[in-house]
Image (cartoon, rainbow, N blue to C red):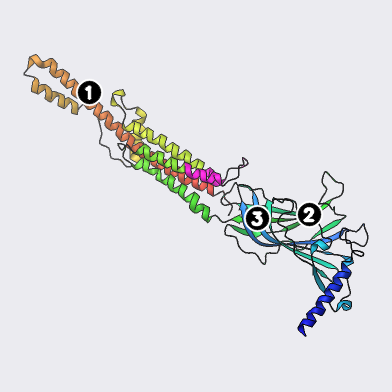
């Protein structure tokens, strides 16, 4: 009994399809309109399933979606009572007329690639519905200024390739894409997919062409990029403080600095590989790496300055007045260094030592000249030691100034750069 019912139902559908698609009555090459001057109204809708990928380097968006199209075909109507109550049938789209709606900004391997056609559903009223599951590969202009805290808006522009608005009149199914079946992406947050209708007159043509444009608005999930790009750079910049914390007599100061700069350059190359080659804007993370490299380079310069003070040759002359005033004076008070008062000229201590030397050798009148030379040498040596001590004290103060300047620079630059990012 059940097999007989199925056989009867199949025969009814077969009889219906034979009547509908009879080549003598139906021509799929002709637009389904009663009057030739009437357009075919095609209702267009989009169901976004997930955001597969956004290729920043090649500026491509991969979206898994269903494309829904529906239109009326007067030649495909029937009276269901004449065909055993059959109210709808499914047919191969190749057997009927279908609108040539394509993705204008398609970036696939061929015109309209990914459009895997399924069965078209036809109702007894002549309503044809086509639901196309596909992976849309579209071009998308990437704005990298706020990377990795960026928001992107990628457009999906659909329209007829050959028919103007007098041949096919597009109509939006809803004001936005259907997100009821959306599966969240691991890399992007979907903010919305609003749709817009446009009727545009192109330079090539006189009549306007209709199109439906969906704006895929997404926001990058920045946790991954913060963990593997921003935090390592921040840690490297903090490690640069080791250059100032190592003793001036340590020969590894410059070696540590060079190792830090090499590591920073390596991470900078990783950032550059993932960014599109554009000169329109510099991404935040790229700006941060550049500023950090400049700060680290300045730290080398400041370290060289400190080392020059520490190893300054005392025979080159007295300590400049500005060093005594600003470093040994104001700087020492600022950092609360309690330096003992030095007397590079040796007016008191050295005179005592010289008088002692002369008293010891005074009874030897024939060696008076030799003792005076010895006293002069002692006085000169003590002056040099006092100068060297002043230079080293100045280097200590300068080193502390450099530490605080560097800390202030890395904190201010970090906040000034990343506070620009949209919330």
Residues in magenta, as a range: 265-288
Q: Where is residue 363, by image quadrant?
A: top left
Where is 138 relative to 286, above or below?
Answer: below
Point 51% across, 46% down: residue: 270
Which secondary structure, mark 1?
Answer: helix
254 in magenta: no
Which of pointers 3 and 1 lies earlier in the amino acid sequence?
A: 3
Which secondary structure, mark 2?
Answer: strand
- Residue 18 falls left or right of residue 59: right
Which of pointers 2 and 1 lies earlier in the amino acid sequence?
A: 2
Point 81% across, 76% down: residue: 10
Point 49% across, 51% down: residue: 228
Q: Residue lying farthest right?
A: 35
Q: CA distance from mark 3 to mark 1?
A: 80 Å
Residue pointed to by mark 1: 380
Given contact means CB atoms under 8 Å apart, are the residues at marks 3 and 1 in contact?
no
Is the residue marked by circle 1 packed among few (<14), some (14-19), or many (20+) residues within 10 Å?
some
Please tell me whether mark 3 or mark 1 is closer to you in this view: 3
Task: Give the x, y percent position of residue 381.
Answer: 22, 25
Q: Where is residue 210, by image quadrant?
A: bottom right
Residue 62's disc is: 3
Q: Nearer the viewer, residue 164 or 94?
A: 94
Given contact means CB atoms under 8 Å apart, are the residues at marks 2 and 1 in contact?
no
Residue 159's disc is: 2
Task: Give the x, y percent position of residue 409.
Answer: 46, 42
Is residue 331 at all visible to an observer of this figure?
no
């Amino acid at each position: 009994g059940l097999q007989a019912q199925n056989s009867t139902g199949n025969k009814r559908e077969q009889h219906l399809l034979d009547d509908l698609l009879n080549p003598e009555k139906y021509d799929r090459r002709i637009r389904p309109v009663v009057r030739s001057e009437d357009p075919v109204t095609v209702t267009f809708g989009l169901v976004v399933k997930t955001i597969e990928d956004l290729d920043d380097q090649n500026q491509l968006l991969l979206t898994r979606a269903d494309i829904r199209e529906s239109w009326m075909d007067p030649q495909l109507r029937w009276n269901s009572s004449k065909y055993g109550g059959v109210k709808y049938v499914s047919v191969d789209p190749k057997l009927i007329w279908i609108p040539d709606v394509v993705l204008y900004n398609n970036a696939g391997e061929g015109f309209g690639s990914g459009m895997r056609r399924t069965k078209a559903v036809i109702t007894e009223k002549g309503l044809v519905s086509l639901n196309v599951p596909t992976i849309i590969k579209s071009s998308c202009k990437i704005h990298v200024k706020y990377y990795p805290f960026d928001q992107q808006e990628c457009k999906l522009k659909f329209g007829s390739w050959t028919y103007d608005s007098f041949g096919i009149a597009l109509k939006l199914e809803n004001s936005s894409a259907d997100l009821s079946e959306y599966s969240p992406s691991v890399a992007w947050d979907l903010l919305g997919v609003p749709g817009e209708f446009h009727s545009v007159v192109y330079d090539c043509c006189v009549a306007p062409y209709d199109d439906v444009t969906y704006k895929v608005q997404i926001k990058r999930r920045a946790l991954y990029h913060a963990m593997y790009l921003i935090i390592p750079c921040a840690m490297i910049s903090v490690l640069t403080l080791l250059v100032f914390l190592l003793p001036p007599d340590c020969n590894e100061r410059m070696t540590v600095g060079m190792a830090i700069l090499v590591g920073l350059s390596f991470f900078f190359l990783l950032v550059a590989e993932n960014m599109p080659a554009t000169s329109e804007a510099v991404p935040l993370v790229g700006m941060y790496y550049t500023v950090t490299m400049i700060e680290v380079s300045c730290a080398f310069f400041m370290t060289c300055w400190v080392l020059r003070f520490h190893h300054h040759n005392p025979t080159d002359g007295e300590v400049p007045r500005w060093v005594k005033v600003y470093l040994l004076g104001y700087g020492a008070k600022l950092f609360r260094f309690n330096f003992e008062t030095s007397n590079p000229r040796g007016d008191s201590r050295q005179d005592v030592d010289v008088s002692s030397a002369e008293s010891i050798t005074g009874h030897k009148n024939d060696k008076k000249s030799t003792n005076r030379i010895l006293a002069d040498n002692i006085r000169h040596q003590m002056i040099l030691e006092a100068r060297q001590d002043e230079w080293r004290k100045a280097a200590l103060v300068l080193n502390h100034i450099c530490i605080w300047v560097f800390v202030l620079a890395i904190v201010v630059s970090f906040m000034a750069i990343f506070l620009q990012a949209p919330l």
